[in-house]
Image: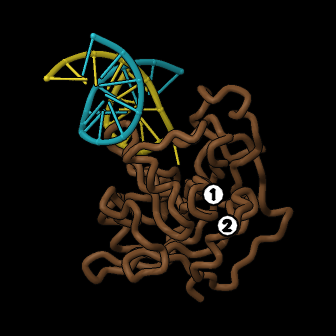
Chain colours: A brown, B yellow, C cyan
Amino acid sequence: MKLQPAYYLNEDVIFLAQDLLGKVLFTQIAGEVTAGIIVETEAYFGVNDKASHAYGGRRTARTETMYSEGGIAYVYLCYGMHHLFNVVSSVKDEPHAVLIRAIEPLVGKEIMEQRRNMVVTKAAISSGPGSAAKALGIDRSFNAKNLTGDEIWIEDQGLKYADDEIIASPRVGIAYAKEHALLPWRFFVKGNKYVSKPNHV
DNA sequence: ATCTGGATTCACT
DNA sequence: GTGAATCCAGATG
């Protein structure tokens, strides 16, 4: 059920970004378990990706997390108030990562409602990377945590979306990356209401 | 030591 | 549609 370390060593981050759709992301904080089905991701293609913090092989205290061996979390604070959760993949020194952009609440919905101060029937509760992370209680303390531990992990519960239910489109919020902004490295589940906008092709 | 801007969201108009 | 909130990492002096 729980994805094992070998899964995260896959060097094809584009494949991984698609494969993670339908997997279930769990967190356990102070004994409270919450989980959601991953319905939207974005691939960040290591040193060759202008949109990546590790573009050009840049290594700093922050990006060092992405250079680690796959299977840990990379959590980054954006705009001073939003935590963005990424899955670090591939082998050591290959800084590939998958940004989790949206989840569909599955376990601990009441807890997520409290964290987000809105009812779970509202799509906005976990739509968009900042919201999804907040619903699951993820903050910077999760940075570099192992994804096979008991605080945060991902399970395969047998849910698999068909190819025609998965849509690939350009990524969001990275216009500064110029030509790389157009690469279809954002993946989401067609018609799922928790997918962040724009949710058309 | 100081400055700048971002892988965003929410509350208004 | 538009703007405000809000803070850390990275770059520069």
Percent position (x, y) of residue A29?
30, 75
Q: Which residue: 69% across, 49% down?
A: A186
Tag 2, which chain?
A
The first of marks 2 and 1 along the sequence is 2
Q: Is residue A96 left or right of residue A148?
A: right
Q: Dividing the picture into quarters, in which one does residue C8 lie?
A: top left
Q: Is residue A173 above or below residue A119?
A: above
Q: Which residue: 39% across, 51% down?
A: A83
Q: Is residue A18 above or below residue A184?
A: below
Viewer-side residue, A173 vs A56: A56
Percent position (x, y) of residue A160?
74, 76
The label shown at residue A40 is 1
Percent position (x, y) of residue A38?
59, 66
Q: Is residue A136 left or right of residue C6?
A: right
Q: Which residue: 63% across, 56% down?
A: A41
The residue that disc 2 covers is A21
* Identity, as a three-letter code, of the amino acid under mark 1: Glu
* SS under mark 1: strand
- Asked whether the residues under the numbered discs 2 and 1 touch, taking CB atoms below 8 Å apart as contact, a structural biologist would say yes
The label shown at residue A57 is none
Q: Is residue A76 above or below residue A24?
A: above
* Identity, as a three-letter code, of the amino acid under mark 2: Leu
Q: Residues within 10 Å of mark 2 (few under 14, many from 20)?
A: many
Percent position (x, y) of residue B10?
36, 43
